[in-house]
Amino acid sequence: MRAIISDIHSNLEALDAVLEDIARRGIDDIICLGDIVGYGPNPLECIDRTMNLSACVVGNHDQAVLYNPLYFNPSATRAILWTRRVLESDGPLATSKRWKFLEHLPSVMIARDAIFVHGSPRNPQNEYVFSTDVQNAEKMLNIFALFERLCFVGHTHIPGIFTEDLSFYTPEDVNFRFEIGRQKLVVNVGSVGQPRNGVPLASYAVCDDLHFEFCRVKYDVEKTVAKIEANAELDNSLGYRLRHGR
């Protein structure tokens, strides 16, 4: 059994709640689909915890901290620049270790018949795959052509399943559990630290060779909101949206 998480976004309370839930299930193989940082108040702690996972790919916010935050909105840009300053100020050994970890994150990971990316196989860091894209046959068929059986993504923060016959299913549509058949699937595991599906719970997925399951976990939202409000470099809206999963 494997757990797949994504889009932590420096939300320590959500990440710890998810890791505790995964441990309760007896799972120790955990893959992260990127965006460890950005938006939230605890980038150092979230990076440190992610370094202990089985594997991680790079997300667009992780890449922006390393280089330049292009095409981000103002509040996201401020959070990235603040995160960079925090990363540079925690002592030379810790700073070097975290920078090297981020710098060496791959864009794509392949394990058996599954591919793991942040955005999509076509553009691993930056391409969004939204539920409405099932109406764009050319885009989806191009994406499905790039992997053999399963593709796990994050980036949109909205969990769900894309099938090769161009259907999309929310976790609720499948009662949070889906059998893996012969058809190719793109699975968005949702977001640990900043859900945008209208449900203010941390989201992740677990899978084996036969099925996968969407999981949701309560965490101390108000504690995270209070940290964001106390930080003059982070926009308060980044905390408020956590209350509503937006």
Image: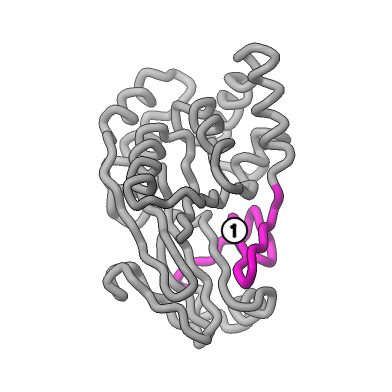
The N terminus lies in quadrant = bottom left
Q: Is residue 112 magenta?
A: yes
Which residue is more in the foreground, 3 or 77? Answer: 3
Residue 137 image position (x, y, % from top left): 58, 83
Q: Name the residue at 42% across, 76% down.
A: 168
Q: Name the residue at 42% across, 73% down.
A: 211
Q: Looking at the image, is 83 positioned above or below residue 93?
A: below
Number of marks in the image?
1
Q: Toward which corner of the image does residue 231 lie, by quadrant?
A: top left
Residue type marked 1: Gly
What secondary structure is marked by label 1? Answer: loop
Residue 205 image position (x, y, % from top left): 41, 59
Which residue is more in the foreground, 107 or 181? Answer: 181
Which residue is more in the foreground, 123 or 106? Answer: 106
Q: Looking at the image, is 139 positioned above or below residue 79?
A: below
Q: Name the residue at 71% across, 49% down.
A: 106
Asked if residue 186 can be seen in this view, the reply is yes
Residue 27 image position (x, y, % from top left): 42, 52
Q: Which residues are magenta?
A: 106-132
Q: Toward which corner of the image does residue 103 lie, by quadrant?
A: top right
Q: Name the residue at 73% across, 40% down.
A: 104
Which residue is at the far front? Answer: 26
Q: Looking at the image, is 94 positioned above or below residue 143?
A: above
Q: Is residue 195 left or right of residue 199?
A: right
Q: Looking at the image, is 208 positioned above or below residue 138?
A: above
Instruction: Determine which residue is flagged by label 1.
Output: 119
For label 1, the crowd category at 10 Å Cα-Cα, with few meaning under 14, some 14 to 19 and many 20 or more, is: many
Asked if residue 237 can be seen in this view, the reply is no
Q: Is residue 56 left or right of residue 41?
A: right
Q: Is residue 189 magenta?
A: no
Magenta stretch secondary structure, dominant: loop
Residue 102 image position (x, y, % from top left): 67, 36
